[in-house]
Image (spheres, helix red, strand yellow):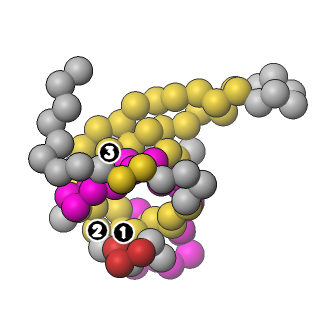
Amino acid sequence: MFDQRKTGRHDFFDERIEFAVDPFSEDALFEAALINCNETGLCILSSKQLSVGQEIILHDFMDYSSRTAVITWIQQCERFSDVDNSAEILYKIGLLFS
């Protein structure tokens, strides 16, 4: 697949971010794992199912707190548990800062 990034990305390990899908509800915060980011957007891994074109609000993430981002792509993934051999559905999500 052709890489369409215009700037380099920075990979992250064990970094968590919070986001909201409703700008008027602070009670509905979700957590995701940060995979990578650059000047124009970021990639996260979340158990929250979202939609392409949907806007989210980032919370408590570096200088991006209260910054909005639009979902540009989603890839469904599965993570298997070694403990009980069950699968968890996760979503790898590409975001573009608004």
Q: How packed is label 2: few (under 14 Cα within 10 Å), some, or many (20 or more)?
A: some
Type of amino acid at the residue the image marks with label 3: Gly
Kindly identify which numbered label has been placed on residue 68: 2
Q: Are marks 1 and 2 in contact (CB under 8 Å)?
A: yes
22 w.r.t. 47: above or below: below
Which of pointers 1 and 3 lies earlier in the amino acid sequence? 1
Amino acid beneath label 2? Thr
Q: Label 1 amino acid?
A: Ile
Residue at numbered disc 3: 94
Q: Identify the residue at horizontal 36%, vertical 68% (top origin).
A: 57
Question: Dot 1, how many residues are within 10 Å of its Cα: few (below 14), some (14-19), or many (20+)?
Answer: many
Task: Please give left or right for residue 78 compared with residue 58 in the image.
Answer: right
Q: Is residue 73 depicted above or below 11 in this figure?
A: above
Mark 2 or 3: in front is 3
Q: Which residues are magenta?
A: 21-43
- Secondary structure beneath dot 1 equals strand
Residue at 35% over, 62% down: 56
Task: Based on the picture, tell me whether residue 98 belongs to the magenta stretch.
Answer: no
**Position of the C terminus by quadrant:** bottom left
Mark 3 falls on what kind of element? strand
Task: Point out residue 94 in the picture as x, y percentages from the top left corner.
Answer: 32, 45
Q: Nearer the viewer, residue 63 or 49?
A: 63
Residue 19: x %, y % from top left:
46, 65
Of mark 2 and mark 3, the one earlier in the sequence is 2
The answer, for residue 22, to whether it is visible in the render is no
Mark 2–mark 3 Cα distance, whole angstroms, equals 13 Å
Q: Is residue 40 above or below residue 90?
A: below
Q: Which residue is mark 1?
A: 57
Q: Nearer the viewer, mark 1 or mark 3?
A: 3
Q: Earlier in the sequence, mark 1 or mark 2?
A: 1
